[in-house]
Image (tube, coloured by chain):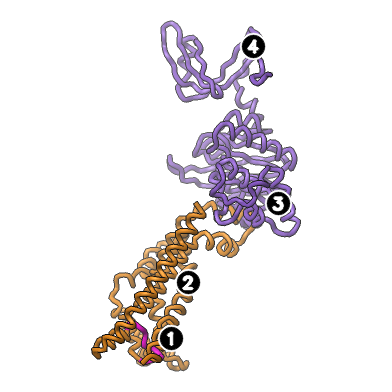
Chain colours: A orange, B purple
Amino acid sequence: MEAEFIETMLLTFELASITTLILLFISIPLAAFLVFTKTRFKSIVETIVSMPLVLPPSVLGFYLLLAFSPASFIGEFLTSHGIRLAFSFEGLVIGSVLFSLPFMVHPIQSALSQVPRSIFEAAYTLGKSKLTTLVRVILPLIRHGLISGIVLAFAHTVGEFGVILMIGGNIPDETRVASIAIYDEVESLNYAMAHQYALTLFIVTFSILLLVYTLNKKSLEGLK
Amino acid sequence: MIIVNVTKQLNTADGILQAHFELTINGGEFLTLFGPSGAGKTTLMRLVAGLETPDSGHIEVDGEVWFDSKLKINLPPQKRSVGFVFQDYALFPTMNVRQNLIFAAENNSGRKYVDTLLEMIELTSLASRLPATLSGGQKQRVALARALVRHPKILLLDEPLSALDPAMRQKLQNELMMIHDRLGVTTLLVSHDIAETVKLSDRLAAIETGHVKRICTPIEFFTTHTLSGKLQLIGEVLKIEKESPIVIVTLLIGSSIIQTVVSRDEGERLQVGEHALISVKAFNPIVIPLNEK
């Protein structure tokens, strides 16, 4: 029982960490695009990014399951290359990335949009490329947005249930994460175990958030 | 020598403006762009820096083409040797004063030059402070020093002194003059302030509705109505009181307010809020220094 608990918790945080890392790399360019673009497709991209906020997780999970199944075009392509996404850890990662996207993009987007245009332009006139400007000037400047995004995306992935249930199922050490385990334990009337999962999640998420808000407040005060 | 001949469509508060800027700036010159807001002064600077792209035309600096619509040349701002001081200073908030300057340096000799500049602009004691802890004048000096780190061919100053109090303005004007004398860098300044313009610039380019209307020395520009007066002052008309048969005009000259009597005809030509030239003749003014011991 103990081993299974640890295994599940580790899998949960592994999923959340990988998802958060991928999201970080996707969201910085995506947020920058949304802040600086002048195309009329901006609203469409914004809508797609924000969809997971209002869409029931089961809807996204259902369509992902259909897409991943070998009967579909995408699934067929993946299967022919030896990739199986339905009921696998990799599939969970893709589902979580899509579902937590707005939680990472929005804080970064809002932080970026507050950076005055002249800060970018000053770096350009000092001979710095866009990439150097981003890495050395802009990212340190919007770190509170990055931290919020990382925390929200991480916490949201840890807490995600619907999408994972649809595409992941409940396979120990492959797709069985804490939120599913709680549901499973409650169903089998094993309240003590459910408690153990629930309380662990509660304490861990509370501690992470508390730590981040404390650090964030300090770093913001230093800049004022 | 800097040659600018560009067109650009501007969206101003009064609608679309077809701007056409044509001017030649001599090497080492201090040129002020003077004119009402919305005339395109800042745009002209941004076109030179490459922060905005002209619709057509040609920009050449010391024989190097920075922009040419026919040859399809358009150097990005990174490739143009400019130092730009922004109205809001645009200091990097997460870097301290020295780091702001070091960031601009390209190599070791650049980093050594940072120390020279910090000393020249009296910033050495502030080197490890973050921009947020500096006063407006100090920020402005850091921005100026940062713009000079790369030895730019042209220094662009977009109303850098407008947000400062008069005493600080005075100090920074002197500093700008000192830097211009010592480094000899070609400088373009946007300014609304007559005293500042006269004090600092070799020549003045009057910008109106997207065109360079006139280039001349500031004194020539502000004393167009050449009178054989012994004393000429420029002031802002604050109040016009018609007391038949004369008119009493209140003017602001520098920071002092004076009242004077003019004829009705003269009074008709004046308007509140506009600048006027006050010329006094046929007497010897007494000029004494204020801080005499």
Which numbered circle lies on residue B285? 4
Label 1 residue SS: helix
Measured Cα–Cα span from mark 4 to mark 2: 72 Å
Whether tag 4 and tag 3 are in contact, CB under 8 A, the answer is no
Q: Amino acid at mark 4?
A: Pro
Residue neighbourhood size for the residue with mark 3, other residues' Cα within 10 Å, grouped as few (<14), some (14–19), many (≥20):
many
| Chain designation of label 4 | B
- At a point 55% along the width and 51% down the height, the residue shown is B52
- Res A63 visible: no
Examine the structure image and report whether residue B45 is included in the region drawn in magenta: no
* Spot occupied by residue B264 in the image (x, y as percentages of width and height): 46, 10
Q: Amino acid at mark 2?
A: Leu
Residue neighbourhood size for the residue with mark 2, other residues' Cα within 10 Å, grouped as few (<14), some (14–19), many (≥20):
many
- At a point 41% along the width and 77% down the height, the residue shown is A97
Which numbered circle lies on residue B172? none
Residue neighbourhood size for the residue with mark 4, other residues' Cα within 10 Å, grouped as few (<14), some (14–19), many (≥20):
few
In the picture of the structure, the residue carrying the numbered disc 3 is B114
Q: Quadrant of the N terminus of chain A?
A: bottom left
4 or 3: tag closer to the N-terminus: 3
Q: Quadrant of residue A61?
A: bottom left
* Spot occupied by residue B43 in the image (x, y as percentages of width and height): 55, 45
Q: Are marks 4 and 2 on the same chain?
A: no
Q: Is residue B105 left or right of residue B52?
A: right
Q: Amino acid at mark 1?
A: Glu
Q: Quadrant of residue B166?
A: top right
In the picture of the structure, the residue carrying the numbered disc 1 is A90
Label 4 residue SS: loop
Q: Which residues are magenta?
A: A171-179
User: Mark 2 against mark 3, which lies toward the viewer?
Assistant: 3
